[in-house]
Amino acid sequence: MKLSPLMNAAKWGELAKFRNIATFRLSPYELKPFAGFISHGVPNTIRRIRGQFFRVAPPFIAGYLVYDWANAENERLSRKNPKDFENDV
């Protein structure tokens, strides 16, 4: 069976007919992509942050404290001891 008679008979997108199937399409120009962003999105984001804060924050705080301690210890160990050079002339 050749497809050219079928394609010539109908528009593109209407090549097949299905019984008892209803299809609905929305035009992208009719959609509201930011509908409810302020009224629903912001409170939901705050709720999610509050729910996960105590799981995420302690490891980050511990990591920062270790990082800060390691930098301070590295600076302390990198300095010269002035008492080693008291007798130099």
Image (cartoon, rainbow, N blue to C red):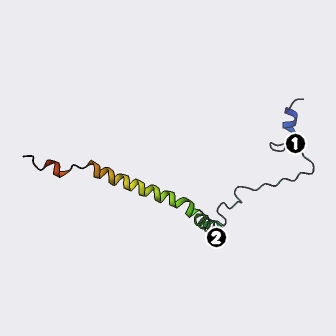
Q: The residue under label 1 is which amino acid type?
A: Ala
Residue placed most toward the observer, 40 or 32? 40
Residue placed most toward the observer, 71 or 19? 71
Q: Name which residue lies at 67% across and 65% down.
A: 35
Find residue 21 and report its horizontal and vertical position in percent. 89, 51
Q: Up-down: is 60 above or below 12?
A: below
Q: Is residue 49 left or right of residue 7?
A: left
Crowd band around label 2 with a 10 angstrom C-alpha radius: few (<14), some (14–19), many (20+): few
Residue placed most toward the observer, 54 or 84? 84
Q: In which quarter of the image is residue 26?
A: bottom right
Residue placed most toward the observer, 82 or 57? 82
Q: Is mark 2 on a helix, strand or loop?
A: helix
Residue at mark 2: 39
Q: Earlier in the sequence, mark 1 or mark 2?
A: 1
Residue at mark 1: 16
Q: Quadrant of residue 9?
A: top right
Q: What element carries label 1?
A: loop
Q: Residue 2 carries which label?
A: none
Q: Name which residue lies at 81% across and 55% down.
A: 24
Quadrant location of the N terminus in the rendered image? top right
Q: The residue under label 2 is which amino acid type?
A: Ser
Q: Is residue 62 left or right of residue 47?
A: left
